[in-house]
Amino acid sequence: MIHSKQLTFSDQQAITSTAASTNILDLGTTGTVVGASVALPSNPGDGTAVPLNVQVTEDFNNLTSLKIAIEVDNTTSFSSPREVLSQSIVRADLVAGKQTSFHILPKGLDERYMRLRYTVSGSNPTNGKISAGIVAGVQS
């Protein structure tokens, strides 16, 4: 799997409570192509296969499950984030090496910034790390 630092949300990020990814992606602003009469949207999530891979790099303990959500907002502070897609993983599956993917970035990535939010259900873990980012492909 090929990872790009520019497309990485989390790099061995310890998840010990509900938290946002360490990094955010700037999807850019809309713009008008020379000669066009209207601006083009800046939306990579048009249903095209753009895999976002999430991998557990350290076993989790204590929690019941971990929800991983893709959020967007028009500011880097994420003062009014909007969730566009999520999935939950139970603790039994939160072991080192476990990969889960969003195989297609969803429609609705229509704001400038994107991040992941990790929401802990149950007790806060004292162990557990995640690496996540947009990748060239997901290894099967």
Image (cartoon, grey):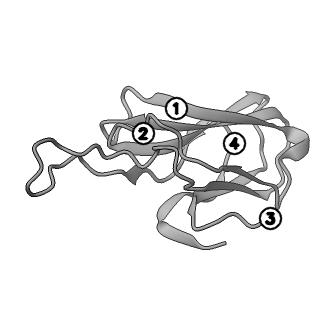
Which x, y percent locates residue 54?
A: 67, 53
The residue at 74%/67% (across/down) is 139
Which amino acid is tagged 3?
Ser
Which x, y percent locates residue 61?
A: 85, 43
Q: Which residue is mark 2?
A: 109
Quote the CA–CA distance across marks 4 and 2: 27 Å
| Element carrying mark 4 | loop
Mark closer to the observer (1, 3):
3
User: Mark number for residue 16?
Assistant: 4
Mark closer to the observer (3, 4):
3
Which amino acid is tagged 2?
Leu
The residue at 86%/39% (across/down) is 91
| Element carrying mark 2 | loop
The residue at 57%/54% (across/down) is 49
Q: Quadrant of the C terminus?
A: bottom right
Which circle's residue, 1 or 4, is located before the other in the chain? 4
Q: Nearer the viewer, residue 101 or 59?
A: 101
| Element carrying mark 3 | loop
Q: Are marks 1 and 2 in contact (CB under 8 Å)?
A: yes
Q: Which residue is mark 1?
A: 84
Quote the CA–CA distance across marks 1 and 3: 25 Å
